[in-house]
Amino acid sequence: MVETLVRNLMRWTAIGLILLSTAGAAEKPRLLVLTDIGGDPDDQQSLIRLLVHANEFEIEGLIASAAGTPGELKKEAVMPELIRAIVEAYGKVQPNLQKHHPDFPEAKKLLGRIKVGNPERGRESLGADKDTEGSLHIIACVDRSNDRPLNVVIWGGSTELAQALWKVRNDRKPEELRAFLKKIRVYDISHQDNTGPWINEEFPDLLYVLSKAPKGKDKRDGGYRGMYLGGDESLTSRAWVDRHVRKERGPLGALYPTATWTAPNPHSTLKEGDTPSWLYFLPVGLSAAQHPEWGCWGGRFRNEAKGLYVDAADTANQVTNARSTVSRWRPAYQNEFQARMDWCVKGVREANHPPVAVLNKDLSQDALQVAAKPGETVTLSASGSSDPDNNALSYRWFVYREPGTYEGEVKIENADKIEAKISLPADAKEKSIHVILEVSDDGSPKLTRYRRAILSAR
């Protein structure tokens, strides 16, 4: 009896530390997924990863959209049963996940948010009497009284969103449509049917992030493909997936598919081309959904026209391309995935949990805006950063050059210490410099959180 009480006390103490680690965090991002699950199995891969991050979001919809199959089997269909199977497997590990963080939703709640879309995709599927359970659910979610925008991520075709927008435009006044559009943010993987360009043309004010290779370029040049191409590809291998996801990680990990349509090489398993869409909104201290040009685990984007943002390019590992905007963060997001798969089966004391990064005493995840004069030295401090497992912390300060407007070299003194000093160059007047704080623990696997300071030379 005493031994049981001691074990429970240790467990709840650990959970309390984790809860304290999330104090001051912003409200969770609202997320609605459109998935053509049943086509390329990488949608199943992405959904499994999403569910072990489900505590970080308010998942409001999992909509099965038209899933095309290749070759002679080509057909259109919707396969919500594949979503249900994965959510049900999640339900078997959810009680253990909840030991690590209390906000993992019950499977029953998520099962109620699975909706069915149109088995046919494209502009010819829009119009009167073309509403679906999925398109009507999108409208209901946007209309729900909430100050937070609805983040719609599109893993396949965008027909359900297009139908929702068509209906609202036809049923409501222009000012009501404008108010509706302001409540939505979209991240689309590759415009996989012709309703995507239609949305951009017809609703140009809608904040729309599009990750897609430019017309006439190799399709593999799309930024989202940095999830599995470029960088350290050993982290996408069958060996890595078997060791950290599929084997001895419970029934959810066991469902992780081992083959996709476009495997990058014979030794790879992980593709997850859709995962960057929601990594973009994941609150790890880098994301700022209203600023696609800033860059985060889900990539970095440039403004193409009004609300439309398209892939930008970063330089990482001596390679400059759009894929680098995602692949540069792969060691961190793969460690995060590994840890959360551990949460499926391990106790709180046996697993690692992410640290908390504090910047100049600020506990939020917002970017810190710092104004200074050219030539002035700015001091940035990570004092107060902590780890729920009491692991030792390491610090790395670096200039994320691409989001800033200053193109010269910026020196950071004590770049590996808890406090760093940055001297603004004399020629940086009216320019901005993005400085990233990276806080990592020494647990297994190493986990990382970030903060961003934007230095403006005035």
Image (cartoon, grey):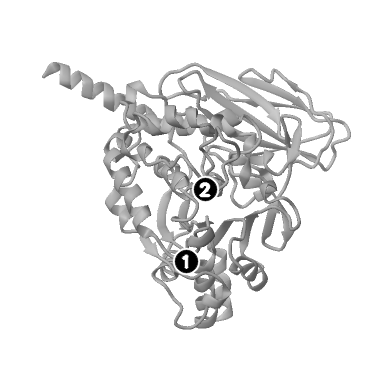
Q: Is residue 358 visible?
A: no
**Relative to residue 379, is residue 341 drawn left or right?**
left
Q: In the rendered structure, which amino acid carries the disc numbered 2?
A: Trp
Q: Which badge, 1 or 2, comes first in the chain's sequence?
A: 1
Give the residue at x 57% y 65%. Answer: 182
Residue 367, given in percent of the width and then of the height, sits at 62, 40
Task: Establish if 23 lies above or below 278.
Answer: above
Q: Quadrant of residue 452?
A: top right
Classify mark 1: helix, strand or loop.
Answer: loop
Q: Quadrant of residue 204?
A: bottom right
Residue 34, given in percent of the width and then of the height, sits at 48, 59
Q: Which mark, residue 278?
A: 2
Alpha-carbon span between mark 1 and mark 2? 25 Å
Give the residue at x 68% y 56%. Answer: 309
The residue mark sitting in front, 1 or 2, is 1
**Relative to residue 348, is residue 188 drawn left or right?**
right
- Please name the residue that numbered disc 1 is placed on: 76
Give the residue at x 60% y 40%. Answer: 264
Circle count: 2
Q: In front here: 117 or 287? A: 117
Q: Is residue 379 visible?
A: yes
Q: Residue furthest right?
A: 427
